[in-house]
Amino acid sequence: MQDESPRAEISRRGLALSRMGRILRPLMKGAAVQQNDPHITLITPSAPMTASTHGGRAKCLQRLVRLDLPVPKTVALSFDAVHRIAAGDMPNIPALLEPFGDAPLLCVRPSSEDPDWGGPGAVLNIGMNDAMYVDLCDQLGAEAAAAMYLRFVQAYAIHVARLDPDMFDDVALDGPEGLSEVLRAYEDETEEEFPQDPAVQLAEVLRSMARAWEGTTARLLRQAKGAPADAGLGLVVQEMALGMGQGECGSGVIQLVHSKTGEPQITGRYLSQSQGRDALSVGAGALFLERDPRGPSLQELAPDAFDDLIRHTGMMRQRLREEMQAEFTIENGRVHILDGVRVARTARAAVRIAISLAEDGIIPKEEALLRIEPRAMNELLHRQVDPDARRDRLARGIAASPGAASGRIVFSAAEAQASAARGEACVLVRRETSPEDIRGMHAAVAVLTERGGMTSHAAVIGRGMGLPCVVGASSLTFHTRRKTLETPDGREFRAGDVITIDGTNGEVLAGEAPMLEAAQDDAFQTLMGWADEYRDIGVRANADTPADATTARNFGAQGIGLCRTEHMFFEADRLTVMREMIFADDSQDRRAALDRLLPMQRADFAELFRIMQGQPVCIRLFDPPLHEFLPSDRAGHRELAEALDLPLSDVTRRVEALSEYNPMLGMRGVRLGITVPEIYEMQARAIFEATIEASRDGDPVVPEIMIPLVSAKREVELVKTRVDAVAVAVRNETGVKFAYRLGVMVETPRAALRAGEIATHCEFLSFGTNDLTQMTYGLSRDDAGRFMSAYVQQGVYPEDPFHMLDTEGVGELLSIGAARGREAHPNLTLSICGEHGGNPESIAFCREAGFSYVSCSPFRVPVARLAAAQLAVRDKLGYISG
Ligand code: PEP
Ligand code: MG
């Protein structure tokens, strides 16, 4: 029987290792440290060091050193030094090692400029060799020493020697025997001894980390996170503060807020006898930090160390002006802070953290506003797929409307309504949607289309309703007749199968994904309030229905900038009357049909005015081509013939007569208003009568009437004359006075160019940048999705111009229109109501151009309020805006 005492085991290990041919050589004494090398810098309070030369981690460690926190000795390598290492030009390693003494035990961590860009994983325990192992067996015990050595050999094998990680799968043992096996496996595979010289070990680790950063995959990954192509990597070499050994030793992480909510909460884990982030991955055995009914805690185990940690992280929050996560070790009861990183956070948490830092006087309000990415507000306004959830991605499309929802697949609006009636959540899957699908969209929890782009029907309506929507998912095969969806990897999904639409990321996922709820909590409200204090451009909403208007009002819109009236005619009872109007033989019959629509329109407008009481409401006169209201298939024609008591052939002939080669450039907008004047007259009357009605029991309403698709001043003159006549008639009939403002939607290039003469006939110009973009590029907004990603990928367009305003081309038309309009009419109100109104970069352009307001979908109103506030704050603080 062998003696099983630890001591005997240590000496046996020592012997065994020696027998494996390793010589326990004395360690080389290094040359003097290069204190004057700006690229290899011992981190001291005053060492010259910036995040843009040495990376965020190095800079943060210096800040911790300045706070006099117990940070182990650290040397930082600059981007330049690391770049040279990758190219084979090694620094003076003995000099680098000099501050760490004769028998160093080190770790190396990445330090990129922005920690979010990632970097190679940390390597711990550099310096472990046979001699150190024997020493540590004495100091810490064989188990701890073997665990440390083993960890290093494995990391070295995988990251430096580039051995297959699977080769360690068969090593079942830990402790000295496991170590022995791992060393043997290493040596068998490499046919070399495991390097013993810490200088060699460190040099190899530095080289492998530097090269990993320059690899193509790593570069693409970080570029996807917003890093520039030439982003640099720094490295920090730090003395190990051992989390293993005798007395209370271990490691963990701590932060003072919850990452998902941002609420104050001491969060983290601690694991005795562990290193790195083991406490997080191990799970079982890790302690809570604060006393917790669920299990033992560090507070109970080592109360003094716990108190120190709270103090240190509190100081980091106060002095680094940020919620930080600290990585720490406890060595024989003594706390070391190894690292500090910004607490990872959801958008919701980011808002609460920024607000509470400002409320605690740690950062000014302006900075709190600047710390929130406007687009991240979407996460607060809509349910989102839990970022920690596993994703079974079926396809990617265009992220047309943010938020996420899961439901059963349905392939038609009627099925969506039936599903909603059964109380079953459904996802409406269509090749593309059309106005006939509106009710199906209302019934669905999300929409997926094969075709379309950012301003296609599904996208615009989806955003307006706050309905998650992915369009242009053309990698899926849509068999709408067979009612199946086929994925690129050959899976088939049928009607009734559950999928998740992630409209924030443009992804279609299999099954029901776990969600995070929307959170417009008090922190969100505070942030919005602060944004309004700074904002200097108005924000209105594009809202067509009472539901939209209520959402817009709740989100703080300062009125409605665009009410598209055509959607009001798709309700079943109205559609038939609308069709009667379209089929009317003469003006008298047309008026008769419109007289039936009048009370409905009046009620629509009166309700909108009441909801928005005291705020402007801009109503756009009828815009789409009439054929959109007619059925497109034979069964629909038959039904219509029945409803209108007409022969089928009459109906078919009429539908054909109304069809156009290019309806978007055909008889729509003001062209319809001029040629079928009864429609606009009915709408004007409905607006005025609703104005009188709504003003009776509240603040007087001043409606705005907007003429769409104008390209010539005569169009405006004609419509204005008719609308004025209706106003006079209504005033005479009712004896009530009211005011109104007439404006023009500038959405054809000609209207922008002739804005001077157009502006003399109206009070405001609102740029409809959806059509204006379409017409400026000669690019169909409904078909652009097919090739937009290829165009953006190949750099033809820097961005989808339907998504982000093309400031060079379309923007020039806006500038010309604004300047000419203003010159002719100095009090002219200028605004934008295309989808770009909710895009932060486009808002910057409109603000620079001196527009009064932007108007966007209700759910983008908070994004626009914040984006506008940031522009004003940046100007105030002297940033270059844009
Ligand atoms: C536009 O063209 O920019 C616009 C707002 O109108 P619509 O999207 O209804 O065509
Ligand atoms: Mg338009």
Image (cartoon, rainbow, N blue to C red):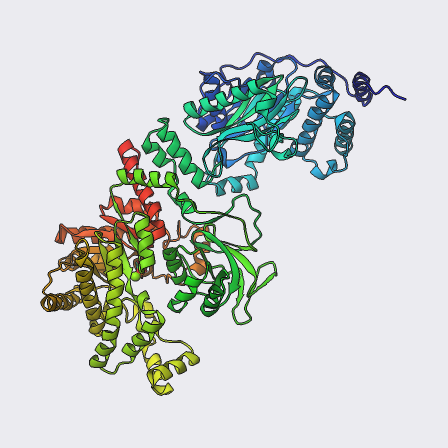
- Residue at screen point 17% across, 61% down: 692
Residue 161, percent across and down? Answer: 68, 32
The residue lying furthest to the front in this view is 293
Label count reads 0
Residue 173, percent across and down? Answer: 77, 31
Residue 779 seen from this side = yes
- Residue at screen point 30% across, 76% down: 577
Query: Relative to 653, does residue 824 appear above or below in the rendering?
Result: above
Residue 691, percent across and down? Answer: 19, 61
Residue 180, percent across and down? Answer: 78, 27
Where is the C terminus found, in terms of image quarters? top left
Where is the N terminus found, in terms of image quarters? top right
Query: Relative to 842, does residue 439 appear above or below in the rendering?
Result: below
804 and 338: which is toward the camera: 338
- Residue at screen point 33% across, 29% down: 364
453 and 332: which is toward the camera: 332
The residue lying furthest to the right in this view is 1
Query: Relative to 302, does residue 341 appear above or below in the rendering?
Result: below
Ligand 1 shows up in which quadrant of the image? bottom left
Task: Please state if 653 lies on the left or on the right of 86 as rendered.
Answer: left
Residue 394 seen from this side = no
Query: Relative to 847, does residue 369 appear above or below in the rendering?
Result: above
